[in-house]
Image (tube, rainbow, N blue to C red):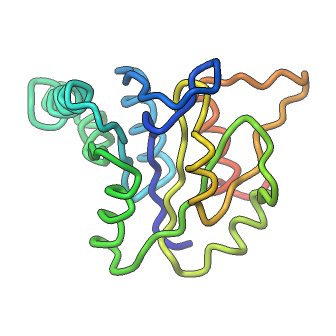
Amino acid sequence: MPPVYAALVHYPVLDRAGRVIAAALTNLDLHDLARLGRTYGLAGIFVVTPLSDQQEFAHRIVGHWTTGPGADCNPDRRTAMQLVQVVGTIADAAAAVAAREGRRPHLTASGARAQPGALRPAAWRDRCGSSPQLLLFGTAWGLAPEVFAAADHAVEPIAGAAGYNHLSVRCAAAILIDRLLGPPG
């Protein structure tokens, strides 16, 4: 499996009316995505927001656990939070992966709504080849249509047993990453 990265995208995402917005970060999302990344061996986690106050907030959280007082009191959390990098755009995240890996990553968009040509996890794994991968997870009401249009792939939405599909980004990312990178079922 090539190196896999994830991006927690706060812009461009949709609000409940379908307008493109920049969503606010949450402390819990950063912690849970970092721990998820560490558990599944992701090469990095990007927090994507163009808003300077939100970038500052993310840097403060990450800094507390990587170089601040939290680093010594919880070394496991430090290791997970060291995966997190704050960037302004999805293009910045892709450029950071390309700089680190020596080639452009394939972008894979995810969401709760079905997308034309979306891949099942096995098909996604088959298409990975040796290229680094950047998985895109949208906050708020999901990734904006232009993100899906620019991505190399989309993956099928998570289908539960009850017909209800409104998971938090933390839950959706955990389920999807397990399906993509975990041991075969």
In this rendering, position of residue 148 left or right of residue 113: left
Residue 100 x, y percent position in the rendering:
29, 71
Give 165 or 39, whichever is nearer the viewer. 165
Residue lying at the far right in this picture: please name it: 162
Q: Can you say which quadrant of the picture contains the N terminus?
A: bottom right
- Residue 179 vs 184, above or below: the answer is above
User: Taking the image as drawn, is residue 65 in sight?
Assistant: no
On screen, residue 131 versus residue 76, left or right, reads right
Residue 3: image location, x then y, percent: 46, 68
Please tell me which residue lies in front, 23 or 119: 23
Q: Residue at x 54, y 24 (%)?
A: 140
Residue 184 % position (x, y): 76, 58
Q: Is residue 144 left or right of residue 114?
A: left
- Image point (51%, 65%), residue name: 133
How many marks overall?
0
Towards the viewer: 163 or 152: 152
User: Which quadrant of the structure image shows residue 17?
Assistant: top right
- The answer to whether residue 143 is visible is yes
Residue 144 found in image quarter = top right
Lateral position of residue 56 relative to residue 140, left or right: left
Residue 8, quarter of the rendered image: top left
Q: Position of residue 108 (x, y in %)?
A: 59, 58
Front position in the image: 142 or 182: 142
Residue under the point 44% across and 30% down? 32
Residue at 37% x, 24% y: name it.
Answer: 25
